[in-house]
Amino acid sequence: MNIKNVSVIGAGTMGNGIAHCFAQYGFSVTLIDVSEAQLSKALATITKNLDRMVTKGSLTEEGKASTLAHLKTNTVLKEGVSQADLVVEAATENTALKLTIFKDMDAAAPEHAILATNTSSISITKIAAATSRPSKVIGMHFMNPVPIMKLVEIINGYATEASVTETIVELSKQLQKVPCVVNDYPGFVANRILMPMINEAIYTLFEGVAGVAEIDTVMKLGMAHPMGPLQLADFIGLDVCLAILHVLHDGFGNPKYAPCPLLVNMVTAGKLGVKSGEGFYEYSAGSKDLVVSKRLLK
């Protein structure tokens, strides 16, 4: 299938990164969000990231101009997906919201269009069941930050056609990404492995084994991780981590996936990590130094 027109639903961190990548590689992209303010913020972020690439020499000024020329926005989903060959949903990790969006996508997108979700844990089969075209529904899980990270975790639902998988694999390669095809079980591969590690790191803090900085230092220097698990949790968003752990716990029924009470409390208190300004660390504009949250210092 020849894909030229791509619609991306959701102009947050993941959505604007996905839109950026497709536009950079010559696809006509419509970025859709109900909020004009969020769309303006997304375009500003994309422009800033393109400027950074130009400064580093990985993109020319002509490449930047071409990328921006391939981008347009829309606040109306029905209009935004009407010409799409591929629609990528990148809304927040909420099952009810995604099911509603997919029903609307299915009703408005052309019959031939592939419907993809950037979910990092929710069942592709369940999402596909909300549509009249489950054979054309697939998971396309990008990693954050999307323009930099090479992996795309491609998840087959129960009914996903082989030809659809092949199309998305080839498309990922066109974006200079490395596709990895997996099957539809809770957390897929990335989060089935990552989230229990993050949860265990939080338990290690919760039980007083070590402090925030010590836990992250052990994992960075001892296990060659570029970022410690608590810093990574802040980067992902503690609310997202909690939502994924709930999916794993509900899906497998195994207590090992039960979220740590400290994580639950932090999310309840609105301490969500980078996006809220505080999680395991405190974040201030312009600062590159990691400062452990005063609430978590022993």
Image (cartoon, rainbow, N blue to C red):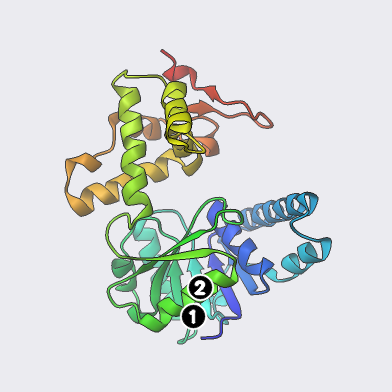
Query: Left or right: 123 with respect to 84?
Result: left
Tell me which numbered mark, 1 or 2, is placed earlier along the sequence: 2
Residue 72 visible in the shown view: no
Quarter of the image for residue 103 reads bottom left
Position in image of residue 56 (x %, y %): 76, 49
Residue in view at x 35 percent, y 24 percent = 205
Query: From the viewer's perspective, is residue 196 above or below residue 33?
Result: above
Position in image of residue 158 (x %, y %): 27, 73
Q: Amino acid at mark 2?
A: Val
Query: From the viewer's perspective, is residue 72 above or below residue 224?
Result: below
The residue carrying mark 2 is 87
Q: Determine whether the residue tagged by mark 1 lies in a helix, strand or loop.
A: loop
Query: Left or right: 289 with respect to 135?
Result: right
Position in image of residue 145 (x %, y %): 57, 51
The residue carrying mark 1 is 109
Query: From the viewer's perspective, is residue 225 above or below residue 29?
Result: above
Residue in view at x 26 percent, y 50 percent = 248
Q: Determine whether the residue tagged by mark 2 lies in a helix, strand or loop.
A: strand
* Spatial CA span between label 1 and label 2: 8 Å
Residue in view at x 66 percent, y 70 percent = 25
Question: Does the residue at mark 1 contact the one at mark 2 (Cβ under 8 Å)?
Answer: yes
Residue in view at x 36 percent, y 81 percent = 162
Q: Amino acid at mark 1?
A: Ala
Nearest the viewer among 11 and 122 is 122
Q: Would you call the spot at circle 2 few (<14 residues within 10 Å), some (14-19), or many (20 or more)?
A: many
Position in image of residue 231 (x %, y %): 48, 33
Q: Would you call the spot at circle 1 few (<14 residues within 10 Å), some (14-19), or many (20 or more)?
A: many
Farthest residue toward the top? 298
Farthest residue toward the right? 61
